[in-house]
């Protein structure tokens, strides 16, 4: 363990050891090597063991990271304003993917109610039983009279009309790690080692991954990620969407920035108790594993599946265009105790040095959908 990081409790350490044993068994059954995507999938989602499948606190000051909805209710309230015209124009519902603590759902529902724009149903697709229970608790505590509108799904519906919403969904999908060499791109996978796990390269067996890696044509010794799972998710969303909008918010770049020469070690990170680590094998089961999003690939997957690009911009631009400042000013600045915490949170959401520039918003639509104010100024579709 790293002595510079917070020490896990005895129970947490025991849990991590069980997770490590499970991963070693998975590697052994696969012949001694697994692609990193399979390792990441198990480390995050293995039933009862994976980071998102077990009961440890993940969100907020007591967890491993803070998401935008945890910073301030103004984030969800602003998104409610952004999607309200689409809900009105389609007569549809909301489907949130990976709803975290339930904070975003509560804030969106509360603001839609204030503007008499509530959908008949707010569906949540989250396969973690632990997180589902936390979401129920959050909704019952904050908007108990609206909790009855929320339904949890086990899979995407066959047909859907309205808004599909996701905050930090793509970054938690298992990624392929690729090492470009003099002999061409190699799949970087995981083997068991005496002290845990280690990297090992092998020839790329998947023709889709090989074609994507070869098309990028990166220089030898470049290591990065390709997220085939994101492509598959976008295709699935397109297949179920009859009419409406897919609105996704996450940290990442267009392809030109994602595969920039200076980013030659990739974007894969582990998050543990508010520390970002380069070692994805540290305390498996206790660390979140993430990679930044290649939004050019997301856009291409959407168009290939029949969706239309509705817009792409920074989180700061989208939130400010959608009325974030006006919502903040509903709290009088003279009331410093109420105003200053919200103003500080808004600063984190929009500052280029914080979340404002690193986080992006992409919209993908199908059918007739009203234009979103969030993309009215500063639309960066040309960068994709």
Image (cartoon, grey):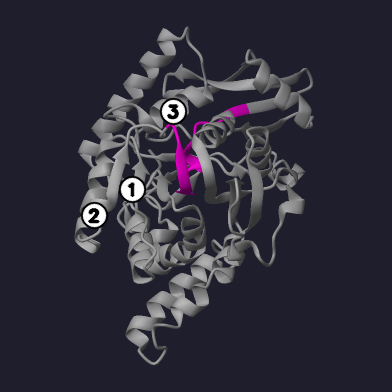
Does residue 199 sit above or below 290 in this rendering? above
Residue that mark 2 sits on: 147
Q: Is residue 168 visible?
A: no
Secondary structure state at the residue bearing disc 1? loop
Confirm or deny contact between disc 1 and disc 3 (CB under 8 A). no
Q: Is residue 240 magenta?
A: no
Residue that mark 3 sits on: 41
Residue that mark 1 sits on: 58
Q: Tell me where residue 166 appears, x and y as whole percent.
A: 47, 48
Q: Within the image, what quadrant is residue 155 found in?
A: top left
Secondary structure state at the residue bearing disc 2? helix
Secondary structure state at the residue bearing disc 3? helix
Q: Tell me where residue 89 appears, x and y as whole percent.
A: 51, 57
In front of the other: 291 or 196: 291
Q: Residues within 10 Å of mark 3 (few under 14, many from 20)?
A: some
Does residue 7 sit above or below 140 in this rendering? above
Q: Is residue 287 left or right of residue 309?
A: left
Identified at 60% across, 56% down, the residue is 358
Q: Is residue 111 left or right of residue 130?
A: right
Confirm or deny contact between disc 2 and disc 1 (CB under 8 A). no
Quarter that holds the N terminus: top left
Q: Earlier in the sequence, mark 1 or mark 3?
A: 3
Q: Tell me where residue 307 appears, x and y as whole percent.
A: 63, 40
The span shown in magenta is 158-177
How far is the residue under mark 2 from the one under mark 1?
23 Å
Q: Nearer the viewer, mark 2 or mark 1?
A: 2
């Amino acid at each position: 363990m790293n002595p510079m990081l917070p020490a896990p409790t005895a129970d947490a350490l025991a849990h991590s050891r069980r997770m490590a044993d499970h991963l070693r068994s998975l590697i052994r059954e696969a012949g001694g090597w697994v692609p990193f995507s399979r390792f990441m999938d198990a480390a995050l989602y293995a039933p009862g063991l994976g980071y998102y499948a077990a009961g440890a606190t993940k969100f907020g000051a007591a967890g491993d990271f803070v998401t935008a909805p945890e910073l301030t209710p103004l984030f969800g309230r602003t998104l409610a304003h952004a999607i309200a015209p689409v809900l009105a124009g389609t007569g549809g519902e909301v489907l949130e993917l990976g709803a975290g603590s339930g904070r975003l759902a509560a804030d969106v529902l509360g603001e839609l109610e204030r503007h008499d724009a509530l959908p008949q149903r707010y569906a949540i697709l989250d396969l973690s039983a632990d997180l589902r229970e936390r979401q129920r608790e959050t909704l019952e505590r904050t908007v108990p009279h609206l909790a009855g509108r929320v339904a949890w799904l086990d899979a995407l519906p066959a047909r859907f009309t309205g808004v599909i919403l996701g905050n930090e969904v793509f970054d938690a999908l298992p990624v392929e790690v690729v090492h470009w060499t003099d002999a061409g791109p190699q799949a970087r996978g995981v083997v068991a080692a005496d002290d845990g796990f280690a990297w090992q390269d092998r020839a790329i067996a998947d023709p889709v991954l090989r074609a994507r890696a070869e098309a990028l044509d990166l220089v030898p010794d470049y290591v990065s990620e390709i997220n085939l799972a994101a492509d598959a998710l976008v295709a699935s969303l397109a297949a179920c969407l009859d009419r409406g909008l897919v609105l996704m918010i996450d940290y990442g770049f267009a392809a030109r920035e994602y595969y920039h020469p200076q980013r030659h070690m990739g974007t894969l990170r582990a998050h543990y108790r508010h520390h970002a680590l380069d070692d994805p094998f540290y305390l498996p089961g206790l660390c979140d594993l993430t990679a930044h999003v290649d939004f050019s690939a997301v856009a291409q997957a959407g168009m290939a599946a029949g969706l239309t690009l509705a817009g792409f911009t920074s989180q700061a631009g989208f939130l400010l265009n959608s009325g974030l400042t006006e919502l903040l000013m509903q709290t009088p600045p003279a009331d410093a105790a109420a105003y200053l915490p919200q103003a500080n949170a808004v600063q984190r959401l929009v500052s280029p040095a914080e979340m404002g520039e690193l986080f992006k918003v992409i919209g993908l639509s199908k059918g007739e959908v009203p234009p979103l104010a969030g993309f009215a100024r500063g639309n960066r579709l040309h960068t994709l």
